Amino acid sequence: MVMDEKSAQVLELPKILEQVARYASFSGGAERIRALRPTSDLREALDWQRETAEAVALFRLRSDITLGGVRDVREAVGQAARGIILEPTVLLDIRGTLRRATTLKRTFARLRNQFPTLASIAERLEECVALQSEISRVLDDAGNVNDAASPKLALIRREMRIAIERLQSRLNSLISNANYARYLQEQLVTQRHGRYVLPLRAEHKGKIPGIVHDQSSSGATLFIEPLVTVELNNAVRELQLAEEDEIRRILRELSALVSHEGEFITRTVEVLAHLDLIFAKAQYAIALRATAPKLVAFQPRADSPHPGCTIKLEGARHPLLDPEKVVPIDLVLDEKTYILVITGPNTGGKTVALKTVGLLAMMAQCGLHIPANPGAELSVFEGIYADIGDEQSIEQSLSTFSAHMTNTIQILRQATPRSLIILDELGAGTDPSEGAALARAILLHLLERGITTLVTTHHPELKTFSQQHAGVRNASVEFDPQTLRPTYRLIIGIPGRSNALTIAARLGLPESIINTARSLIGVEELVTDELLNELQQTREETRRAREAALAQREEAERLVRELRQRLEDAERERLDVLAQARRIAESELENVRKEIRKLRHALQSAGQSAEAVKRLEAAAFEVQPNFESPSISVPSLPIVEDAPPTYRLGETVWVVPLRAEGQITEIGATDVEVTVGRLRVRAKFDEIERRSKSSSAASEKGREKLPERKPSPGLELDLRGARVEESLARVEEYLDAAYMAGLPFVRIIHGKGTGALRKAIRDALNRHPLVSKYQRGEESEGGDGVTVVNLISMS
């Protein structure tokens, strides 16, 4: 595409490119941006858009990929090729550029699957590893040549250090000599013109034999080199010159190496400039909240002069206007339209609408994303031509009309059916009737040639042009007669109406004058104006109704999403409760089975038959994990006839210290084991009393019973997410229920967090009468996020 530079200036494309250039990382990228021009090749435009889209996705995913440290070193490479010795700072710039290129190449190699376009570009970067290593070996990060740059340089610097030490030692001996010290301004060694000197008072000139190299600004101090140190100074100076020669030789070799790698370095800088261009486009798109347009090919129709162009822009904003104040426009050309005639009052936004469309088309063909709603579609035009604004030229003796006509003639010569023409105020600046005739003739010419055209005009004759010719459509900019201000909205399909009489009436012009003016206007024009007014009102009512319907639809969709989310949350909560209940049931069932195994062992120890043990075990293990609070009922064991004569296993006895009734489960030499509820205790013979059934029944009212067991609240209390006050109340209630259910221990899950909830709970446990002790949970149980509480026995 050979872009018309004048049209680009009129549509303000250079201003856009200047804004994009601010996001460039180095001068090479900024130059590429400023030189960017729209392409007329669809494939190239699609490639550019793909590059920008990938870069936008990259920056939204990662913020650590930059071109920091890159410099445009192509000029330095050219100097090296001409034999010029490069400065150390320039060599460091070359190394920094190559290092960044290496990093980018390797990074994109890892990201190839996600960003194939950018990876293929970065693949062309040259690392020049040998040159990077050599520069790092020779120079430190401050640009100083290292001692190890060459053996000769290392030897020279070692000898120089020795020579300087000897020289300074000799000068220090002079300073410390009392005969010389009184002549010195200060007792120090300094340098002048590369020679080590002493500051001698001017009035003592000649007292210390030597060579004067300088004096102070006041003349009170002379800087002399004592004769006794001249040879030592000469030796130091000779070594300094030798050092400079060796450094120059090393830098010359390094510059020659740069020249040898010059082709690769230049190519790398150019690829980096291309990446900088892409990255700047992406950052500009993110800042502008722009979207990627869909670029399409022309689809000409065989039975019509329609060029097959596509322009679909909704919510389009001019990128140079304040985004908080600019009014977005919608401009969509249907399948039958390729010429749009926009009418309306001055300052209503017609020119801005034209500029917005033309500028966004150029931006899209430059690979830039455009400030419009997603789904924008544009054809790739071979040329975009614009004639906008007052082109009056005093130097060329051209009036406004002549200037516009000159531009129009030039545009008509260059345009093709695949061009976009934008003409502002067509036919203006001359006699209205002649201007209207010219405007109609030009539109007819463009219509016959099938060229996509957008024009603005004040001529009322053009309002009926679209009704008479296929492919042409009217549009207008909206004006609010109540506020006497334009709304800047573009309305396609309705021509602009005159608001002069309405505005004059609202501004206070006498009604008689308004009526006289109305009578002077043709009846047909008045009727047309009234019809347009009614049509615009109907359209506005339709637009508001549509906006209200869309708002209601969005609200309904929001409510549906919210309800669906609530249902999903409720289902998740239900599943969590079921899972937790199952875990608690399984835990309690396991506790029951443990008790059964203990009873089995006790029964076997007491000599019960194997069949009785199996029956009891089978009955116990039929318990399923779908109960709420399993409890164990200790069976009344039959009295064993061959038990010891004094007491028998299973015999019911009264435990005096506990004031409770129990059954003997084990008999020892001096004591017995008695089961009282779920508690097993050992008691001496004198601490128990035999009870018969009758005495047990007789004393049923007088004795103290164990508390009745309540349903189990479960072995765990989960307090994660609860507040401290609520949690302490729940802990109190839970411990009471656990104690009444006879649970030996429980787990309180409070989480780790800040530790405030854990501390409050453990402080409460320290004072609780039902707690015998507590400890942190095992790592498998949750560690510090869980407290295991042992309860006192109910007996």
Image (cartoon, grey):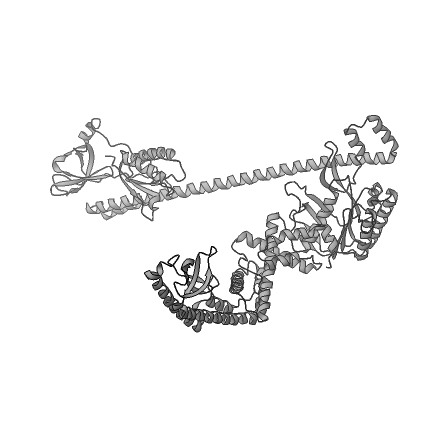
Query: Residue 580: horizontal and vertical position, in percent?
Result: 39, 42
Left or right of 438 in this view: 27: left
Of the pair 329 and 715, the residue shown nearer to us: 329
For the N terminus, which image quadrant?
A: bottom right
Of the pair 550 and 589, the residue shown nearer to us: 550
Left or right of 147 in this view: 658: left
**Residue at the extreme bottom:** 152
Question: Can you see residue 712?
Answer: no
Query: Residue 525: horizontal and vertical position, in percent?
Result: 85, 36
Quarter occupied by residue 620: top left
Left or right of 682 in this view: 82: right
Question: Can you see residue 254?
Answer: yes
Of the pair 373 and 136, the residue shown nearer to us: 136
Work out whether 219 lies above or below 697: below
Total labels drawn: 0
Q: Residue at x 51, y 55 (%)?
A: 64
Query: Residue 2: horizontal and vertical position, in percent?
Result: 73, 59
For the C terminus, which image quadrant?
A: top left
Work out whether 530 lies above or below 595: above
Q: Residue at x 34, y 64 (%)?
A: 173
